[in-house]
Image (cartoon, helix red, strand yellow):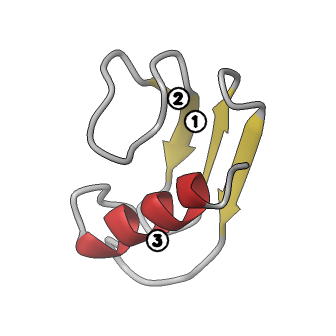
């Protein structure tokens, strides 16, 4: 499990926790935003949170919050 200790641009809030799997399946919980996110895919090494896909995913999730 991982815990977010600092906020990045468009990313999870401090105190969020979860786990990115190596094949892209990931879950995170953001208590600050009352948010849970689950991503399910099967692609080798897609769990690397530095990939552009993840930036786009988190940007879309947080833009959808009212």
Asked if 48 appears above or below 53 in the picture, the reply is above
Mark 3 vs 1, N-terminal side = 1
Asked if 36 appears above or below 55 in the picture, the reply is above
Q: Determine whether the residue tagged by mark 2 lies in a helix, strand or loop.
A: loop
Cα separation between marks 3 and 1: 15 Å
Where does the image place residue 9, in percent across and percent down from the top left?
Answer: 27, 43
Asked if disc 3 and disc 1 are in contact, CB closer than 8 Å, the reply is: no
Asked if disc 1 and disc 2 are in contact, CB closer than 8 Å, the reply is: yes
Cα separation between marks 3 and 2: 16 Å
Find disc 3 in the rendering and name its residue: 23
Asked if 21 appears above or below 2 in the picture, the reply is below
Observer-nearest of 18 and 33? 33
Find disc 1 in the rendering and name its residue: 18
Tag in front: 3 or 1: 1
Asked if 17 appears above or below 44 in the picture, the reply is above
Cα separation between marks 1 and 2: 5 Å
């Amino acid at each position: 499990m991982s815990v977010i200790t600092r906020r990045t641009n468009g990313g999870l809030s401090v105190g969020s926790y979860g786990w990115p799997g190596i094949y892209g399946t990931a879950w995170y919980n953001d208590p600050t935003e009352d948010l849970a996110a689950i991503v399910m895919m099967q692609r080798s090494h897609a769990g690397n949170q530095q990939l552009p896909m993840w930036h786009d995913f988190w940007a879309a999730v947080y833009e959808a919050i009212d």
